[in-house]
Amino acid sequence: MTPHVFTAPDGVRLAYYELGEGRPLLLLHGYMSDAHTNWMKYAPTAQTIADAGFRVIMPDLRAHGASDKPHDPAAYPKDILAADQFALIAHLGLTDMDAAGYSLGARTLARMMALGFRPGRAIFAGMGLEGLTAADRRAGYFRHVLTNLGTHETGSPEWMAEAFLKTSGGDPIALNLLIDSFASTDEATLRSWDVPISVICGTEDQDNGHAEALAEILAQGCYVPIPGNHMSAVTKPDLGVAMRDALCSPA
């Protein structure tokens, strides 16, 4: 798919893709990934949702995919990913929509909601409570991966993360700087959202904490388990089916 490109208020060029027609859905990928890898390469997640009558809008987050990857620390203030999505929504002239994200995409959506965004429905996939309330809990791990490339023990989690980075063509300098922009959301704020939110997570995935605990504190939270761990869940059709069903469930 050919990306569309627009310019954020700070001059950074950001790419996004569209698939399908109907109700808009903002679909946000995970860290070190991109729209194509997260939603189309391994499983037809985006197509499954589009076939259900949605206009699926998939940005490449800043420092990822076809979007710019600045090496200037000033390009990564707190909540810049949320600000980028607000700019995209304004660029497209959207007012009523749903939103979903996987891992970093889910945290970005949470930050958007903490700043006042209210989608009709929301999905936090690959996300647990601690991944939102303690955004820096894995910062040291990722900094270690990105600053020690080529030295990780074969088969280790760090080695696997580096292999994924190579697959997605990620820029380690930009991705390392992006970590400084991550912000946490406190439990009181999470409890205040009176919006249907599905928490979809692999049964072997605790990379971002406890998904069931997150669903329990949300006013209209619903926990949906799917097969897999944090990496493998996006390669299975179950993710797309669960997301489609959550978006199409009765109000």
Image (cartoon, rainbow, N blue to C red):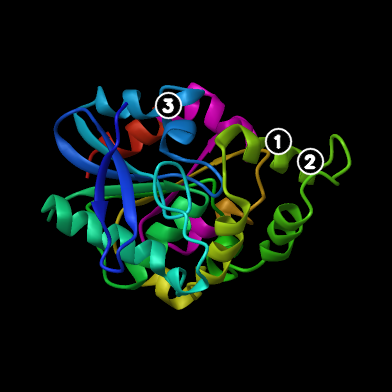
At 15% from the left and 50% from the top, the residue drawn is 92
Q: Picture quarter containing residue 143?
A: bottom right
| CA gap, disc 1 and disc 2 | 6 Å
Q: Which mark is residue 11?
A: none
Residue 236 appears in view = yes
| CA gap, disc 3 and disc 2 | 24 Å
Helix, strand or loop under label 2: helix
Type of amino acid at the residue the image marks with label 1: Ala
- Asked if residue 115 lies left or right of residue 53, the reply is right
Helix, strand or loop under label 3: helix
Judging by the rendered image, the residue that carries numbered circle 1 is 163
Residue 174, image x and y in percent? 55, 58
Q: Picture quarter containing residue 17?
A: top left
Q: Is residue 146 above or below residue 41?
A: below
Judging by the rendered image, the residue that carries numbered circle 3 is 40
Type of amino acid at the residue the image marks with label 3: Met
Q: Which residues are magenta?
A: 213-240
Query: Sequence order check: which comes first, mark 3 or mark 2?
Result: 3
Query: Sequence order check: which comes first, mark 1 or mark 3?
Result: 3
- Asked if residue 160 lies left or right of residue 200, the reply is right
The 10 Å Cα crowd at callout 3, few under 14, some 14 to 19, many 20 or more, is some
Within the magenta stretch, is there residue 230? yes
Q: Which mark is residue 159?
A: 2
Residue 79, image x and y in percent? 42, 70
Q: Is residue 141 above or below residue 80?
A: above
